[in-house]
Amino acid sequence: MFERFTDGARRIVVGAQAEARELRHRHIGTEHLLLTLLDENGEVTRTAARHGLDASGVRARIVRRSEDPLDPEALSTLGIDLDAVREATERTFGAGALDVPARECRGPKGHIPFTPKAKKVLELSLRHAIRLKQKEIRDGHILLGLLHDDAFLSARIATEAGVDVEALRADIDRLMASRAA
């Protein structure tokens, strides 16, 4: 399937690993593919930007999500006060007991695997190309894959950014269809 990717689409897939490494993530997820795609300079990126989806905003959302592995809001819905837990833990085990160990703060080395959902995005990009009767997989097909399923972090990030995902999908669909003409 990778042979059907244009050079630009390949750059997105390869660049996602660099983004994951820079963010010190141990996987390549849909969010990394989205971030890399939005760093490109092309019509698809400009269309996404017109809908309110840009690399800096996505990067900020990804960083916010990965800052603290313990979600204070989610825990509070269960009646758990994270600040109280931290305080009690530090009294017993010392300051910073819940902090990420230094060895985990370094970026991952070597190969970083794609998550199953990121792999699914690449498969969906092929399906979108086929649906549009196109032989090559381009950046727009990847974006359609990234926005295809609301369970993908990429789609949730777009929604959180206030993007009308359906309208963006429709515009990208039209753009990709016009490229085939």
Image (cartoon, grey):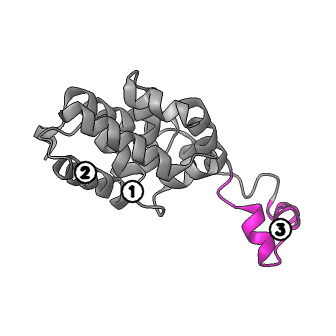
Tell me if label 1 and label 2 are in contact, CB under 8 Å.
Answer: yes
Tell me if label 2 and label 3 are in contact, CB under 8 Å.
Answer: no
Magenta residues, as a range? 68-93
Which residue is at a point 48% across and 38% down the rendered structure image? 107
User: What residue type is disc 3 on?
Assistant: Val
Q: Percent x, y for residue 168?
A: 47, 44
User: What residue type is disc 1 on?
Assistant: His
Quarter of the figure with residue 42: top left
The quadrant the C terminus occupies is top left
Residue 149 relative to residue 73: left or right: left
Quarter of the figure with residue 120: bottom left
Which residue is at a point 38% across and 38% down the rendered structure image? 16
Q: Residues within 10 Å of mark 3 (few under 14, many from 20)?
A: few
Ranked by sequence position, the earlier of labels 1 and 2 is: 2
| Rendered image: mark on residue 128 | 2
Residue identified by numbered label 1: 148
Which of the two discs, 2 and 3, sits closer to the camera?
2
Residue 139 relative to residue 130: left or right: right
Which residue is at a point 84% across and 66% down the rendered structure image? 92
Seen in the picture, residue 179 relative to 76 is either above or below; the reply is above
Q: Percent x, y for residue 94?
A: 82, 57
Quarter of the figure with residue 171: top left
Which residue is at a point 29% across and 55% down the rendered structure image? 119
